[in-house]
């Protein structure tokens, strides 16, 4: 099976880190559970220039390397790889963040997972003039059986995969969103994701 996994807020606690960055840079104190929008500019009520500054700071290599693992993520992913499933980490981070992102994965035991940077949200959502190493045309030629994603803004990239089973990692910014169809399942943590994927595999006959 081929499994798509988002990076930020699925593998690591990016939004929690950004609440601290926003407080340090601008004195804005928004608790993590109050981050109601995936777009952090809206969640923190930032100007365009402040938002750019936030993104630049949050994508510095040393900052990227400091993000904490989402509990259980690496263990479950390695179990899948051990079972010969193909894991593709598809991040919306710009390619300038690739080396640090790859190093973080390697240092957390995920050397076997493939990493791609895809412009999921439009250039204005990240550092200006960003490059990405996976184009949309290439992405739409890829096939996935399962996906782990937290961002409602990324659901549109799954529309061409009619049988894709999507595990939506529960986060404050997706709790009020409406799922596109019955293939989407809300999961509270990585153990729930593991169980849901296993259940789906047994139901579809992909697991013996």
Image (spheres, helix red, strand yellow):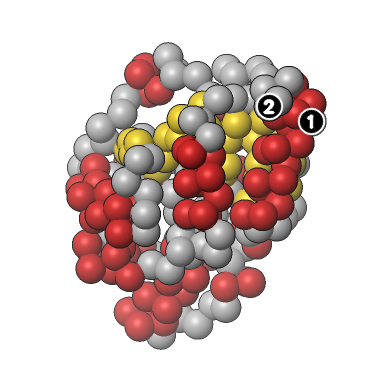
Residue 30 visible at all: yes
Q: Which residue is mark 2?
A: 207
Q: Indicate the position of residue 149 as horizontal and vertical percent values.
A: 57, 44
Using the image, determine if residue 42 lies above or below residue 181: below
Q: Secondary structure at mark 1?
A: loop
Residue at the outermost front position: 208
Camera-side mark, 2 or 1: 2
Q: Nearer the viewer, residue 201 or 131?
A: 201
Q: Quadrant of the C terminus?
A: top right
Cα separation between marks 2 and 1: 21 Å
- Residue depicted at 65% across the width and 62% down the height: 172
Q: Place residue 167 in its image quadrant.
A: top right
Asked whether, in this view, residue 72 is left or right of residue 17, the answer is right
Closer to the camera, 146 or 134?
A: 146
Vertical side of 59 occupied by 96: above or below: above
Return the residue nearer the eye: 35 or 92. Answer: 92
- Residue 178 position, x and y percent, is 75, 41
Identify the residue shown where x is 70% and y is 37%: 198
Image x and y of residue 161, in percent: 59, 19
x, y percent for residue 181: 76, 29
Tag count in the figure? 2
> Quick one: quadrant of the N terminus?
top right
Instruction: Say above or below: 164 vs 79.
Output: above
| Residue behind mark 1 | 182
Q: Is residue 45 at least partly visible in the picture?
A: no
Which numbered disc flags the more N-terminal residue, 2 or 1? 1
Q: What number is the disc on residue 162? A: none
Which residue is found at the position 33% from the left and 70% from the top? 66
Q: Nearer the viewer, residue 33 or 194?
A: 194
């Amino acid at each position: 099976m081929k499994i798509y996994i988002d990076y930020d807020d699925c593998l690591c606690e990016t939004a929690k880190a950004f609440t601290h960055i926003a407080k340090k840079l601008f004195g804005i104190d928004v608790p993590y559970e109050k981050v109601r929008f995936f777009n952090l500019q809206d969640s923190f009520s930032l100007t365009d220039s402040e938002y750019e500054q936030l993104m630049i700071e949050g994508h510095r290599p040393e900052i990227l390397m400091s993000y904490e693992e989402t509990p259980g993520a690496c263990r479950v992913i390695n179990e899948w790889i051990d079972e010969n499933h193909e894991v593709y980490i598809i991040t919306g981070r710009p390619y300038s963040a690739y080396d640090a992102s790859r190093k973080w994965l390697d240092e957390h035991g995920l050397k076997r997972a493939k990493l791609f940077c895809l412009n999921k949200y439009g250039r204005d959502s990240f550092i200006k003039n960003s490059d990405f190493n996976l184009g949309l045309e290439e992405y739409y030629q890829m096939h996935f059986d399962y996906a782990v994603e937290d961002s409602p803004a990324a659901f549109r990239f799954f529309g061409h995969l009619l049988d894709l089973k999507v595990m939506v990692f529960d986060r404050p910014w997706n709790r009020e969103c409406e799922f596109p169809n019955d293939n989407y399942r809300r999961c509270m943590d990585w153990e729930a994701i593991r169980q849901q994927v296993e259940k789906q595999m047994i139901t579809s006959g992909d697991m013996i």
